[in-house]
């Protein structure tokens, strides 16, 4: 889960996407093409404090990485 993308709004809310924003996901994302939604990567949407939640994900990620070695 190394490709985490955070999109923050002015009010501090936002979306955390668990895939890169480039490639097919970035190209199709929000395109409105019929059937394009099935290619959307997993995401947490409408998070009230997106920076705090991103920090929690990053902390869990680094703990999991250090436990596996």
Image: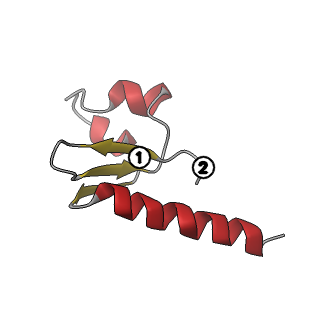
Q: Which residue is mark 1?
A: 41
Q: Quadrant of residue 64?
A: bottom right
Structural crowding at the residue carrying mark 2, measured as other residues with C-alpha within 10 Å and reported as few (<14), some (14–19) or many (≥20): few
Is residue 10 placed above or below 23 in the rendered structure?
A: below
- Taking the view exactly as shown, the residue that stands out farthest to the left is 11
Residue situated in front as seen by the camera: 51 or 47: 51
Q: Nearer the viewer, mark 1 or mark 2?
A: 2
Q: How many marks?
A: 2
| Residue 35 on image: x %, y % | 27, 37
- Taking the view exactly as shown, the residue that stands out farthest to the bottom is 67
Is residue 26 placed above or below 12 in the rendered structure?
A: above
Residue situated in front as seen by the camera: 34 or 18: 18
- The kind of secondary structure element at disc 1 is loop
Q: Which residue is mark 2?
A: 2
Residue at the (42%, 34%) spot, across then down? 25
Residue at the (26%, 60%) spot, across then down? 49
Residues at marks 1 and 2, CA–CA distance in whole angstroms = 13 Å
| Residue 24 on image: x %, y % | 45, 28
Structural crowding at the residue carrying mark 1, measured as other residues with C-alpha within 10 Å and reported as few (<14), some (14–19) or many (≥20): some
Residue at the (49%, 26%) spot, across then down? 23
The reply to whether dot 1 and dot 2 touch (C-beta < 8 Å) is: no
| Residue 4 on image: x %, y % | 49, 48
């Amino acid at each position: 889960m190394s490709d985490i993308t955070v999109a923050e709004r002015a009010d501090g809310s936002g979306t955390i996407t668990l895939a890169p924003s480039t490639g097919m996901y970035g190209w199709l994302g929000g395109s409105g093409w019929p059937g394009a939604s099935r290619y959307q990567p997993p995401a947490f949407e409408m998070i009230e404090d997106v920076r705090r939640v991103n920090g929690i994900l990053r902390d869990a990620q680094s703990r999991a990485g250090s436990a596996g070695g």
